[in-house]
Amino acid sequence: MKRLHPSYRNFQKMDELFFQLTFFIYIAATAGFIVHLVSLRKNVEKIALYILAAGFCLHTVAIILRWISEKHAPLVSFHDTFSFLAWAITLAFLLFQAGHSVKALGAFVSPVITIMLAAGLMHPRQVLPLPPALKSLWLPVHASICLVSYALLTLAFCIAIMYLIQERQIKKKRLGAIFRRLPSLETLDVMSERCLKIGFPLLTLGIITGSMWAESAWGSYWSWDPKETWSLITWFLYAALLHQRLTVGWRGRKSAYMTIIGYVTLLFTFIGVTYLLPGAHSYAL
Amino acid sequence: MPSDTDKLDILLLGVNHKTAPVEIREKLALRDMDPPALELFYNLSSCMEVVFLSTCNRVEVIVGTNDISTAREQIVEAWLAHSGITEKDFGKSTYEYTGLEAVRHIFRVAASLDSMVVGEPQILGQLKDAYRNASETGCSGHILNKLMHKAFSTAKRIRTETRIASQAVSISYAAVELAKKIFGDLRGKSGLMVGAGEMAELAAQHLKANGIERLVVANRTLERAIELSNSLDGEAVSLAELEDVLVDVDIVISSTGAPGLVIKKDQVKRIMRPRRHRLLFFIDIAVPRDIDPKVNDIDNVYLFDIDELKEVVEENKAERQKEALKAERIVESEVIKFKSWMKSLDIIPIIKRLQEKAEAVRQRELKRTLKNLKDLNDREIKAIEKLSQSLVNKILHDPIIFLKKGSADKDRDEALAMVCRIFALNGNGETISLENYVNEKKNVKSQCGSKRAN
């Protein structure tokens, strides 16, 4: 095994290169989606999708290389979590488009993907040693479930924004270029619900696995650390939203607003808490 | 385009909704004739190729001919004789295009730029039918084949590159388009007609055609509601049940003659909870209005009245006009492409003539040489023949390439004349091959004629 050691360094250099390449490819895909939105040329959208898929493959390789060089799941530092979130959004988006293509969604999601990866690349990429208490299988399980749920809730957020824009066009009878380019209201509503219906159970599972990990690492399931508190708040918001949707039939504008509020809270839980309210989760900064 | 007696050119004679009233168009359509109109024209001696297009808005004869003026005379004569229209009426209502003008016209027709409703896609299918008819009966040949295929591809290009046909230009279509922007797929949705106006009926039919599952008709007199619901395959209810029905339906088209409001805001507000806030789309095409305009303020409820729909239609029409300009540009560029194809046609006879001349020289000289060399064996004779062959081919190679490549150039006419002069090719060389083509066509025709006689 010792002979392998020098190649770790190569891996590190390579994953850096791959991340940067991925970033530029995501920018290209974003540009493609926007060109498609303006010009409405069908083949441009297809090309943009292929570019994004290519970026996704490269991104996957980069994450694997990083896993090898870090020797634990690359889900600890902001560099890695942002990158993983961008990866998961791309995956969710590509799967969605393959199943039920939503017109113009790419132009809204791809900038978010690009921003997420950019945020990751802006954070220091060096690997800090993990406290021994946290070295466990719970790390990849808890973190990846949380981040995948964030990715789906990000999609729900993008779709909610599209809904509000389109809703406004129809209410105000402005039936111009924007109206023509965005999908129908019901399509958007159904898709956003689908994201919530997958994202919310994953978020729940993420919180549960987190508390189980806490029990095995620190000996208590719940210690009201800021991250835990805020993720509970986020969870309650999404739970309320889904509850209203399923029981009263809430949909449309109200639901879209709630989706956006929930997502802002989620972002605060993910980013803000770590910066502003230090606690057990303030890792690697 | 100069008409040359030896050259196959395109002639188009026709009428459309702008130039002739429907009575004249009907007569010129020559329906239920035996032989059919297409063959009537094909049997004229001057018409080598024919496509006959007849729709409710236009009747056109498109022919490939080597003699435009005779073809015109014969077509007019035959057409007048069989339609029973006076020469004066005919002259007043028909238009005539030749050469590239005809090409441009057909391209514009195919792309629906010449239609009553610009961008309406029906005409392309009709033109395709007309062409299929002509090619199945052997009436179209290589010029019209090319013309038609190019017309179809131009129309397709225009439809993908412009938005000429993408927007509704009638109120009822606009309503359906809006419904699609709200609900996406209309399958599984249900509609309600309040009142029994004609436009509402039309809109309801469009909704049905777009997959709406259930249609309810509510009217002040239940009798009329039942009558209408029977013709539309729906259910009838009385106005008193309106609120109950509103809970279930998705699209409401209102067109009563009532002087006041039929659907009020608090009524709609009440039903939103039992509807579980499902989207509700009101189309109010009544004057005065049936539905309280404030209904539009309720969440998940969308209301369009007749003026707003008209505005949508007007905007779409203006948009279509803009798109039509783009489409005309595409037509122009395709006409130019077609022009160079037509020009390249007269290169082929020159090349043929050149090869024939060289071959004649070769044969003559070969004969003379072999006559003087009597003691050659077969193998040596073959070698000499091969030598002469390859000499001719090598020498002609470059001039032929020059002809082919130069066919797109601006001063190609001069180049062609130059080649003809250098090689002393009589005339411009088109005679032979075109004669062949014409004769061939005549043969086919006479065969067809005899078949029909049998």
Image: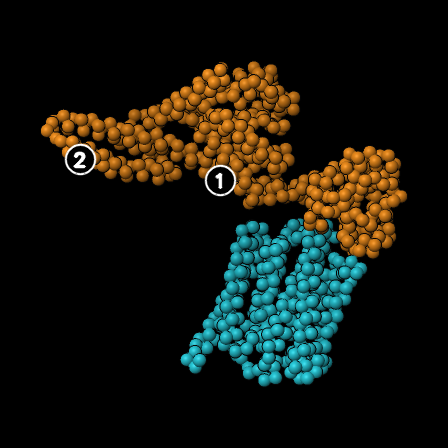
Chain colours: A cyan, B orange
Residue position for label 2? B383
Dot 2 or dot 1: first in sequence order is 1
Q: Chain of mark 1?
A: B
Nearer to me, B227 or A34:
B227
Nearer to me, A253 or B426:
A253
Position of residue B133 relative to residue A76, above or below, is above
Position of residue B265 relative to residue B4, above or below, is below
Q: Chain of mark 2?
A: B
Position of residue A269 relative to residue B357, above or below, is below
Asked if marks 2 and 1 fall on the same chain, the answer is: yes
Residue position for label 1? B333
Q: Residue at x 63, y 28 (%)?
A: B56
Asked if residue B304 can be seen in this view, the reply is: no
Residue B411 % position (x, y):
36, 36
Position of residue A124 relative to residue A166, above or below, is below
Q: Residue at x 25, y 36 (%)?
A: B393
Count of numbered marks: 2
Q: Quadrant of residue A264?
A: bottom right
Q: Is residue B49 left or right of residue B25?
A: left
Q: Residue at x 68, y 71 (%)?
A: A205
| Badge 2: residue crowd in 10 Å (few <14, some 14–19, many ≥20) | few
Asked if residue B343 can be seen in this view, the reply is: yes
